[in-house]
Image (spheres, rainbow, N blue to C red):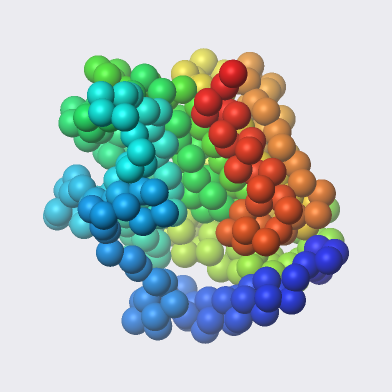
Amino acid sequence: MWPPNLPWKVRLFVTAFGFLTDASFRRNGSVNRRFINLIDFKISPSDKPVNGVTTSDITVDPSRNLWFRYFLPSAAEAGKKLPVTVYFHGGVNYRLAPEHRCPASYEDGVDVLKFLDENPPANADLTRCYIVGDSAGGNIAHHVTARAGEHNFTNLNIAGVIPIQPYFGGEERTESEIQLAGAPLVSVERTDWCWKAFLPEGSDRDHPAANVFGPKSSDVSGLKFPKSLVFMGGFDPLRDWQESYCEGLKGNGKEVKVVDYPNAMHSFYAFPDLPESTLFMRELQDFIYPQ
């Protein structure tokens, strides 16, 4: 099911991307990395400003190819400290499943935070650190934040977490999964395949990595957890799981702001032509730079 008034260019891209993604998934649960790398475009870092931003790659642990791309606004004033966003999908180069199953990506994320704490960038105000992630990265953002709450940092303080249409699930089929089973990008068939590839061997979708507040999850009421900004979309099959996640946080005494776009599909933010994309950026700005 497609959102109304979706531009044909977006439909074409999403359809093609879905087809190519499916072609890289093997029936045995492995991924054709050679093929998927053809559509996973990578841009080299640049010390010359591109769209007002300079970039560099910083290695954390060469033994597992763990590194992150550092983005710095070229207009940043000398000596001025800026808030830090640690982004999953385009920021941290964490290990991928199925070659490296859960919790490898969570461990990599926490190790990047520890690295930043011990090696603060010159322009970084680490007391204003935000953990951000979209889709599967939203799942990682939650779990990295939860794990980081058990660590005593010297310089770094997580001021907020921003899961953008986070990838959560469970054994139960929700109403949104049933109604939007064949949705673009995250059809139920694709999400089931991804959970099997990501979760530890022998686990089902009620594993705490997928179903954060499910029957197999532990009590998180005493967990140190910052305020959250969670984005959802009405045409996302994962919407009901995201809503349950927000209710779980609230029920455990955590501060949550929910932004729900009724006509947004999964990954709407990747398409600047969509009106929700502009609204989304404003919400991010207001959360990170509160008035």
Nearest the viewer among 61 and 276 is 276
Residue visible at 64% across and 73% down?
14
Most extreme residue toward the left is 63
Nearest the viewer among 94 and 17 is 17
**Where's residue 236, x and y in %?**
72, 56
**Does 291 sit left or right of 103 as displayed?**
right
**Does 26 sit left or right of 91 as displayed?**
right
Q: Relative to 147, is 238 above or below? A: below
Quadrant including the N terminus: bottom right
Residue visible at 56% across and 53% down?
135
**Where's residue 176, x and y in %?**
79, 54
Q: Relative to 265, is 142 above or below? A: above
Snapshot quadrant of residue 90: bottom left
Tell me if residue 249 can be seen: yes
Q: Relative to 130, is 4 above or below? A: below
Quadrant including the C terminus: top right
Residue visible at 28% across and 39% down?
112
Tell me if residue 172 can be seen: no
